[in-house]
Image (cartoon, rainbow, N blue to C red):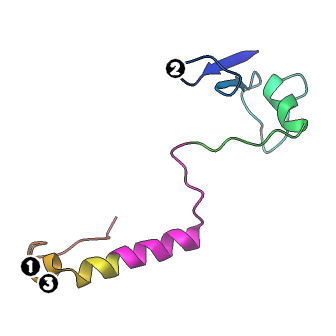
């Protein structure tokens, strides 16, 4: 069993069991892997901290609001962006 330490104190909440099989391949769980056995028993999947739960449509709507807010801002209207504004082109 592979364990991951997640915080300043060892508690049952911050010890997470890792896959000993390398992770599920195409959603197929491996019998005998401690984390796969946990998932098969109904444990929730963990969300990576760098990933958002935001959907693609929500992300697009948020980006549109950010761009509209930038173009309506005093900084943009006064030329503070420079000769060619590239805000939102990422």
Residue that badge 1 annotates: 79
- The label nearer to you, 2 versus 3, is 2
The magenta stretch spans residue 54: yes
Where's residue 14, x and y in %? 64, 26
Where's residue 20, x and y in %? 75, 21
| Disc on the earlier residue, 2 or 3 | 2
Q: Residues within 10 Å of mark 1 (few under 14, many from 20)?
A: few
Instruction: Report the Cα–Cα distance between label 3 and label 1.
Output: 6 Å
The magenta stretch spans residue 50: yes
Judge from the rendering whether residue 77 lies leftward or rightward of residue 35; answer left or right. Answer: left
Instruction: Name the residue located 57 percent from the left edge and 68 percent from the top edge.
Output: 56
- Disc 3 to disc 1: CB gap under 8 Å: yes
- The label nearer to you, 2 versus 1, is 2
Disc number for residue 77: 3
The chief SS type of the magenta part is helix
Judge from the rendering whether residue 43 lies leftward or rightward of residue 53; answer left or right. Answer: right
Residue that badge 2 annotates: 8
Instruction: Name the residue located 63 percent from the left edge and 21 percent from the top edge.
Output: 4
> Magenta part of the protein: which range?
49-66
Give the structural element (helix, strand or loop) at label 2.
loop
Where's residue 40, x and y in %? 89, 37
Image vertical order of residue 43 relative to residue 53, above or below: above
Give the structural element (helix, strand or loop) at label 1.
loop
Q: Residues within 10 Å of mark 2 (few under 14, many from 20)?
A: few
Instruction: Name the residue located 54 percent from the left edge and 43 percent from the top edge.
Output: 49
């Amino acid at each position: 069993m592979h364990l991951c330490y997640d915080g300043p104190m060892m508690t049952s909440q911050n010890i997470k069991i890792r896959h000993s099989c390398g992770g599920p391949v195409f959603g197929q769980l491996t019998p005998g892997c401690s984390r796969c056995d946990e998932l098969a028993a109904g444990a929730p999947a963990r969300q990576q901290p760098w990933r958002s739960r935001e959907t693609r449509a929500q992300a697009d709507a948020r980006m549109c609001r950010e761009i509209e807010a930038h173009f309506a801002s005093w900084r943009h209207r006064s030329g503070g962006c420079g000769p060619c504004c590239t805000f939102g082109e990422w």
